C-alpha cells in the first residue's frame, strides 16, 4: 500500500506511511506494538483466516476500515489529501498533522491454544477505561485522594473484581501518586472490592469524571443540566489549553441543576472543556460553536437532550446500541432531543458515512463479531427521539421513508440546509419530500433540493406532509424545483405557519377556514396562482382564517389576481410587492374595475399595520377615497403602480398611527395632503407623480424626518413650521416659483434639494440656523444675485456660530448666471478654506 500523493503537512506521508522492507517499522508507523501481533503469524493451522488480520481495530472505529479508506483515497481521489490538510483537522485515513495513525487502544483477534483445540479470541491492549481511582489507603473514603489516569496492577496472586473478591495477594498499586481533589463535585461513581494480602479492600473509582470535550475556540457559552445534585453540590468546570496545562480557567460550583459558564479569551486556541460531575447525572448538554470534533468516551445514560450544533464533528456519534459491535452500548440511549446542526459529517473519514443514507451500500461490511452494519446513519440514534435537527450536515439523496421508518414518535423534524450541506438527487429524477411519523408538529426542509411531494402509507406509519393532522409549522422554502399543490389536511386544526418561498408550489389547498393559521409566506414563488380561487368568484383562499397575521407574497407570481375582501380580522401585514396583482373587485360574483382598491377590500382588517402593494399590472383607476378609512392601526403604506394608477389620493384622516407613506411612481393628481391628522408620520414619498398646486404648510409634525416631493408638477411652496426631526427635504424637478421659505424651525435639516424649479427669491435668515446641514442644491433656478448674496452671507454666519466643514452647496444655473458681489465671493473663499464645497457660475 503506497501513497500516491506525497504531501508534506508536518508529516512526510510517503516516508511515514508506505511500503517498507521491515515489517516491524511498518507496524510502528501505525502505532501497533509488533510483539503483541506476532501470535497471529503462522496460525492458519489453528483456524485463523485473513479476516483475523483485518479485524485489528480501535475500541470504537475498526482499523481495517481506516486502512481501506486510506488505500482507496490515495489511489482514487488524488486531491483529497490536499483538501483535508490543515491545522484544524486530520487527513483522510486519520493521518494527523505532525503525527501518525493513532492506535493507543487496540482490539484484535488472537489464537488461544494449538492444533485442533486452538480457538480464536478477542483481546484489548488499552489503558484503563476508568479515568480515576482512589488510593488504596485503609480505610478508603469518598474524600480520599485520587489517581487520574492511573494504571492498576496487583503483584502475583492478587485479584481485582467488582463485588466480593477471592484469593489473596500483595497490595494493589497505581502507577502515579494520588492527588487531592480540586473541586467539591468530584464524587466517586463506583465502588470496587479487591482482595489484597488476604484482606478485602474497597476502592472508589470515578468513571468519566471529568467529562472532557476538546475544541478550538476563543469564546464559549456552555450549559449542562443535571437530573439532581449530589449532596447539594453543584458542578464545576475547567478550561485548559491543550498545549499548555498551566493556562487554564476554573469555574467552581456553577449554578444549581443548571450549570452554565461563559468563557472569553483574546485568541482562539485548542482547549479542553472539562466538566466535573458524575455523567450519570447529566440530563442536557448544550455546547455550540466550539469546534468540538468528537464526543467524550462517556455514556450519558440520563441524557435526554444533546445540542452540539455548529461544531466540527465529522464522525457521527454512536448514540444507541444499534449499528455498533455486539457488546458495546451507545452514548445516550434515552435521548429525546438531538441538535447537530452544521457539523460537517459529509467529510467523514469513511466514505460510506459521508451521506445520511449510503445508496450504494450492499451489506458486505461487518463488525469483527460478524454483526452487519446497516446502511443509514440514523440507526446510530435512539428510535425514541422526538426532536431532530440535522440541517447542514449531509449531501446527497435519501429515500422517502428513511425518517418515518426510524422515528415513530418524532414531533420536530428539521433537516434544512442552514448554510451547509443539503439533500439533493444524486442523478436525474425527482427527490420526494421525506415522509415522517403522524406525530410531527414541526416540519422543515428549507434550502434543499427536494422536487416532489410524494405520497405516504399511513398503515406503515409513513405520512406525507399532506396527511399530517398535528402539523403546526411547515417550511418548504428554497427547494427551487419543488412543484405541485400541497394540501392541508381537513382534520388539521392546529396549523400556524406555512412557508413555501422560493419554490414552484401553488397556493395550498384546504386553507380556507383554518382558524389557527398565523403566517403564510410565499416569497419568490413562480407559480402561486390567484388570491381568489377562480377568476369570476369571490372565493378568497384565506377566507375565515381568523388568526392570520401575516400574508407575505413578496415577488410571488399572482397571475394578475384581483383583490379579495380580506376576511382576516387579525391581519397585520400584507406584502404584495413585485407581484402581478391587478386590483379591482367584485359586485357579487361580477368583476368590477371602478377602483383599483375598492372600498370593501380592507373593511374587515382593523389590525392591519403594513400594506405593501407594488405591481406593473395595477389598474389605472383610482383608489377608493375611503379604502383605508377603517384601518386605524395602519402604520406603513407602500403603493407603486409604475405610473399607472391615477386620480386623487385616498383619505388618510382615519389613520392616526400612520408612520410611513410611500406612494411613489404613480400618476396621482390633485393637491398634496398636509398630514395634520397623522401626528406619527416620519417618512413620506410622494415623488414621481402628477401632483399640482402648492406644497401645503407642514407644521407640528414632531416625527417627520424624510419628505420626498420631487418629480411632480407642484407650483408653490408653503411654510415648514415646528419640524424638529426633519432631515431630508427633496422638492426638485417641479415648477415651484416665488421665495425660498424659512427653514429656521427645521434645526436638524441635513439634505435640502430644491434644484430645477423656478425660485426667484430667498427669505433672509432662512439658512442661518441650519447648523447640521450638509448638502444644499439650488441649481437651475431663477435666483437673483441679491438672493445668492444673502444665501452665502447666511451660510457664512451659520459657520461662524458653529464651525464645521464638509458642507456642499450647489448654486449653478440661476437666472442667467447673475453676478454675485465681492463680499459673497469672499464668503465663498473663507468657507472653502474650512472644507466647504461651493459651486456657482
Image (cartoon, rainbow, N blue to C red):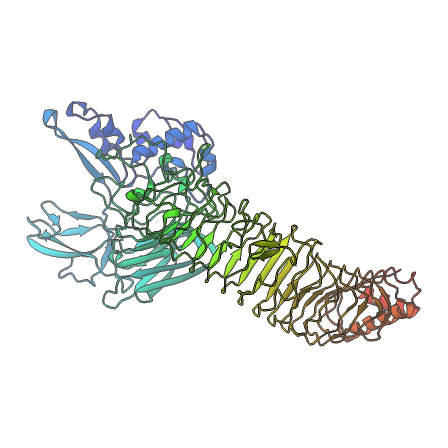
- At x 64% / y 55%, what residue is drawn? 593
> Which picture quadrant has residue 20?
top left
- At x 58% / y 58%, what residue is drawn? 587
Asked whether, in this view, residue 198 is left or right of residue 445, the answer is left
Give the camera-side residue of 110 and 710.
710
Q: Is residue 743 above or below residue 836?
A: below
Q: Is residue 48 above or below residue 596?
A: above
Asked whether, in this view, residue 359 is left or right of residue 164, the answer is right
Q: Position of residue 152 (x, y in %)?
A: 19, 49
- At x 91% / y 63%, what residue is drawn? 815
Give the camera-side residue of 621 and 485.
621
Give the camera-side residue of 49 and 445.
445
Quarter that holds the C terminus: bottom right
How many callouts does the rendering have? 0
Q: Position of residue 354 (x, y in %)?
A: 39, 38
Quarter that holds the N terminus: top left
Q: Is residue 132 above or below residue 670?
A: above
Residue 17 visible in the shown view: no
Q: Position of residue 173 (x, y in %)?
A: 17, 51
Q: Position of residue 390 (x, y in %)?
A: 39, 47
Q: Is residue 486 above or below residue 375?
A: below
Asked whether, in this view, residue 803 is left or right of residue 812, the answer is left
Asked whether, in this view, residue 492 is left or right of residue 527, the answer is left
Give the camera-side residue of 240 and 391.
391
Residue 488 visible in the shown view: yes
Amino acid at each position: 500500500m503506497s501513497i500516491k500523493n506525497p504531501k508534506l503537512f508536518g508529516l512526510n506521508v510517503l516516508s511515514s506511511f508506505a511500503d517498507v522492507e521491515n515489517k516491524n517499522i511498518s507496524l510502528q508507523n501505525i502505532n501497533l506494538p509488533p510483539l503483541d501481533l506476532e501470535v497471529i503469524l503462522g496460525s492458519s493451522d489453528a483456524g485463523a483466516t485473513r479476516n483475523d488480520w483485518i479485524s485489528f481495530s480501535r475500541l470504537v472505529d475498526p482499523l481495517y476500515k481506516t486502512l481501506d479508506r486510506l488505500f482507496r483515497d490515495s489511489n482514487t481521489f488524488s486531491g483529497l489529501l490536499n483538501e483535508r490538510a490543515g491545522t484544524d483537522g486530520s487527513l483522510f485515513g486519520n493521518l494527523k498533522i505532525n503525527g501518525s495513525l493513532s492506535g493507543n487502544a487496540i482490539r484484535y483477534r488472537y489464537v488461544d491454544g494449538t492444533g485442533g483445540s486452538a480457538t480464536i479470541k478477542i483481546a484489548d491492549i488499552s489503558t484503563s477505561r476508568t479515568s480515576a481511582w482512589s488510593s488504596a489507603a485503609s480505610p478508603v473514603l469518598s474524600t480520599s485522594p485520587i489517581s487520574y489516569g492511573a494504571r492498576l496492577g496487583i503483584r502475583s496472586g492478587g485479584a481485582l473484581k467488582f463485588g466480593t473478591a477471592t484469593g489473596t495477594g500483595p497490595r494493589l498499586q497505581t502507577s502515579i501518586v494520588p492527588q487531592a481533589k480540586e473541586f467539591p463535585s468530584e464524587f466517586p461513581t463506583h465502588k470496587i472490592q479487591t482482595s489484597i494480602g488476604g484482606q478485602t479492600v474497597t476502592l472508589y473509582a470515578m468513571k468519566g469524571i471529568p467529562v472532557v470535550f476538546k475544541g478550538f475556540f476563543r469564546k464559549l457559552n456552555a450549559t449542562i443540566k443535571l437530573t439532581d445534585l449530589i449532596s447539594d453540590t453543584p458542578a464545576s468546570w475547567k478550561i485548559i489549553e491543550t498545549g499548555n496545562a498551566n493556562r487554564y480557567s476554573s469555574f467552581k460550583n456553577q449554578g444549581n441543576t443548571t450549570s452554565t459558564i461563559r468563557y472569553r479569551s483574546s485568541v482562539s486556541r485548542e482547549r479542553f472543556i472539562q466538566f466535573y460531575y458524575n455523567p450519570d447525572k447529566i440530563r442536557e448538554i448544550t455546547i455550540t460553536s466550539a469546534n468540538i470534533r468528537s464526543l467524550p468516551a462517556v455514556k450519558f445514560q440520563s441524557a435526554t437532550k444533546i445540542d452540539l450544533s455548529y461544531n466540527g464533528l465529522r464522525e457521527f456519534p454512536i448514540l444507541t446500541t444499534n449499528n455498533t459491535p455486539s457488546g458495546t452500548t451507545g452514548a445516550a440511549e434515552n435521548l429525546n432531543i438531538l441538535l447537530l446542526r452544521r457539523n460537517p459529517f459529509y467529510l467523514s473519514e469513511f466514505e460510506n458515512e459521508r451521506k445520511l443514507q449510503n445508496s450504494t451500500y450492499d451489506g458486505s461490511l461487518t463488525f469483527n463479531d460478524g454483526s452487519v452494519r446497516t446502511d443509514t446513519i440514523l440507526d446510530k440514534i435512539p428510535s425514541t427521539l422526538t426532536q431532530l435537527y440535522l440541517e447542514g450536515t449531509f449531501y446527497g439523496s435519501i429515500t422517502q421513508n428513511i425518517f418515518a421508518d426510524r422515528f415513530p414518535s418524532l414531533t420536530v423534524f428539521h433537516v434544512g440546509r442552514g448554510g451547509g450541506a443539503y439533500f439533493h438527487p444524486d442523478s436525474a429524477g425527482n427527490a420526494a419530500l421525506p415522509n415522517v411519523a403522524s406525530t410531527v408538529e414541526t416540519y422543515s426542509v428549507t434550502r434543499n433540493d427536494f422536487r416532489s411531494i410524494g405520497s405516504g402509507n399511513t398503515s406503515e406509519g409513513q405520512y406525507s406532509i399532506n396527511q399530517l393532522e398535528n402539523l403546526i409549522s411547515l417550511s418548504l422554502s428554497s427547494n427551487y424545483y419543488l412543484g405541485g399543490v400541497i394540501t392541508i389536511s381537513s382534520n388539521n386544526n392546529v396549523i400556524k405557519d406555512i412557508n413555501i418561498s422560493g419554490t414552484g408550489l401553488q397556493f395550498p389547498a384546504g386553507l380556507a377556514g383554518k382558524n389557527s393559521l398565523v403566517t403564510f409566506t410565499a416569497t419568490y414563488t413562480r407559480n402561486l396562482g390567484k388570491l381568489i380561487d377562480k377568476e369570476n368568484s369571490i372565493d378568497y383562499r384565506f377566507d375565515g382564517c381568523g388568526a392570520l397575521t401575516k400574508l407575505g407574497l413578496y415577488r410571488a407570481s399572482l397571475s394578475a389576481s384581483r383583490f379579495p375582501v380580506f376576511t382576516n380580522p387579525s391581519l397585520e401585514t400584507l406584502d404584495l410587492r413585485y407581484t402581478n396583482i391587478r386590483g379591482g373587485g367584485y359586485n357579487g360574483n361580477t368583476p368590477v374595475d371602478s377602483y383599483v382598491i375598492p372600498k370593501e377590500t380592507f373593511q374587515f382588517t382593523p389590525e392591519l399595520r403594513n400594506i405593501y402593494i407594488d405591481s406593473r399590472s395595477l389598474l389605472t383607476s383610482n383608489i377608493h377615497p375611503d379604502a383605508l378609512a377603517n384601518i386605524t392601526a395602519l402604520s406603513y403604506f407602500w403603493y407603486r403602480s409604475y405610473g399607472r394608477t391615477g386620480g386623487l389620493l385616498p383619505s388618510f384622516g382615519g389613520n392616526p398611527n400612520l408612520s410611513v407613506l410611500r406612494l411613489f411612481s404613480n400618476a396621482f393628481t390633485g393637491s398634496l395632503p398636509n398630514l395634520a391628522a397623522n401626528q406619527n408620520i416620519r417618512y413620506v414619498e410622494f415623488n414621481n407623480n402628477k401632483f399640482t398646486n402648492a406644497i401645503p404648510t407642514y407644521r407640528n409634525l414632531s416625527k417627520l424626518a424624510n419628505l420626498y416631493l420631487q418629480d411632480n408638477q407642484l407650483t408653490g411652496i408653503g411654510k415648514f413650521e415646528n419640524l424638529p426631526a426633519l432631515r431630508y427635504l427633496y422638492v426638485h424637478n417641479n415648477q415651484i416659483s416665488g421665495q425660498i421659505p424659512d427653514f429656521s424651525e427645521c434645526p436638524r435639516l441635513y439634505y435640502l434639494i430644491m434644484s430645477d424649479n423656478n425660485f426667484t427669491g430667498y427669505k433672509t435668515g432662512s439658512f442661518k440656523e441650519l447648523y447640521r446641514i450638509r448638502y444644499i442644491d439650488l441649481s437651475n433656478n431663477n435666483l437673483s444675485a441679491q438672493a445668492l448674496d444673502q444665501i452665502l452671507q447666511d451660510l457664512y454666519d451659520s459657520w461662524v456660530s458653529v464651525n464645521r466643514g464638509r458642507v456642499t452647496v450647489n448654486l449653478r444655473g440661476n437666472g442667467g448666471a447673475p453676478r454675485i458681489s465681492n463680499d459673497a465671493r469672499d464668503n465663498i473663499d473663507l468657507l472653502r478654506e474650512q472644507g466647504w464645497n461651493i459651486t456657482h457660475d
